[in-house]
Each structure stands twice: as C-alpha cells, then as structure tokens.
Amino acid sequence: MSDIGITRGSLLKMKRLKYQVEVAAPRERVWDVMLADSTYRDWTSIFSPGSHFVGEWVSGQEIRFLGEGGNEGMASRIAESRRPEAVRIEHFGVVKDGVVDTTSEQARKWAPSIEEYTFHATPEGTRLEVVMDADESYVDFFDDRWPKALARLKEIAEG
C-alpha cells in the first residue's frame, strides 16, 4: 500500500492489530460483501448497531463511518482503493453531533490511524486480512469483535 504520510512513531498509544479469515468465495465477492452498503451494515453491526458509511470507497475520497442516528463516528479518507486487492483507510478525526472534530482528546485517540483490508486469492477462495491501528484502550474490544464480524462477513459471502 502507498505511504500517506503517517508514521508509526506518530501513533503514540496505538497498537497494530491484525485479523484474518479464509472465505470460500472469489475476491470480487468478498470485496462486494465487505464494502457494499447493505452487507456492510450487516457485518459491522457486530461492532455497533446501525453502523454504516457515508461516502465512497474511492482513492482520495472522504468517508464517514457512523453509528445509529448518523451523528457520531469516524472521519476518514480512502488513502488507496484497488478493487479487488486492497483498501487503505486513514482515520483523521471523529464525528460528534454531525461535526468533524480533529483536535479533542477523543479525536487524538484515533487520529491519525490506519486501517487496511487486503484480499488475497487462494486456491479455496480468498484470505481477507485486516490490519488496523487502535488506541490501547480499545484492544480488548476489537479482539472480541473483529473475529465475530469476520465470521459474519464469511457467512454472507459464502451464502
């Protein structure tokens, strides 16, 4: 993936987390299930009910990842999008009451951080790898939820 100007040294209390799942479906199918609006809402509900995005999975585009009600979430940019190979997301702030915040303590817990999805073709289908930076206080949450979310994504993609 390309460098977008964020160094690991600038991520003060961040941990790099990695998750993966094997899916018996082609990369294009896994990509579509992961990133299409209706199926995204399904598998990401594991993290938060009502999870959705506003924007496009296109390189250079701003995208918001929001929860139920649409007024709270993450302000991000698609640093790189190469269908069906990889997506790299740069989180640069939080959304609070519908407004992007890049300076508060809560925003600084997340920004800057990176989230990457890589879709590897395998003889059986696709190995999806997720790598993300997370504030140390969220590690247990993500270690619990990502495997469940990826299991749900796998179920949808193989169904």
Image: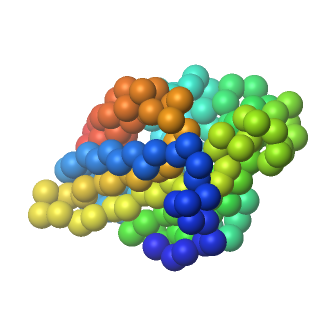
Colour treatment of the image: rainbow
The structure residue drawn at horizontal position 37% and vertical position 61%, both measured from the top left corner, is 118
Looking at the image, residue 100 lies above or below residue 7: above
Q: Position of residue 39 (x, y in %)?
A: 48, 40
Q: Position of residue 153 (x, y in %)?
A: 36, 40
Residue 132 horizontal side relative to residue 105, left or right: left
Q: Position of residue 1 (x, y in %)?
A: 46, 73
In this rendering, the count of numbered labels is 0
Q: Position of residue 125 (x, y in %)?
A: 20, 58
Looking at the image, residue 73 lies above or below residue 24: above
Q: Is residue 84 visible?
A: no
Looking at the image, residue 32 lies above or below residue 80: above
Residue 74 horizontal side relative to residue 44, left or right: right
Looking at the image, residue 9 lies above or below residue 107: below
> 5 or 36, which lies in front?
5
The quarter of the picture where the C terminus appears is top left
Specify the quadrant of the image occupied by residue 5.
bottom right
**Residue at the extreme bottom of the image, as rendered:** 2
Specify the quadrant of the image occupied by residue 117.
bottom left
Residue 81 horizontal side relative to residue 16, left or right: right
Q: Is residue 155 visible?
A: yes
**Residue at the extreme left of the image, as rendered:** 123
The structure residue drawn at horizontal position 70% and vertical position 65%, both measured from the top left corner, is 61
The structure residue drawn at horizontal position 58% and vertical position 23%, both measured from the top left corner, is 49
The structure residue drawn at horizontal position 73% and vertical position 35%, both measured from the top left corner, is 106
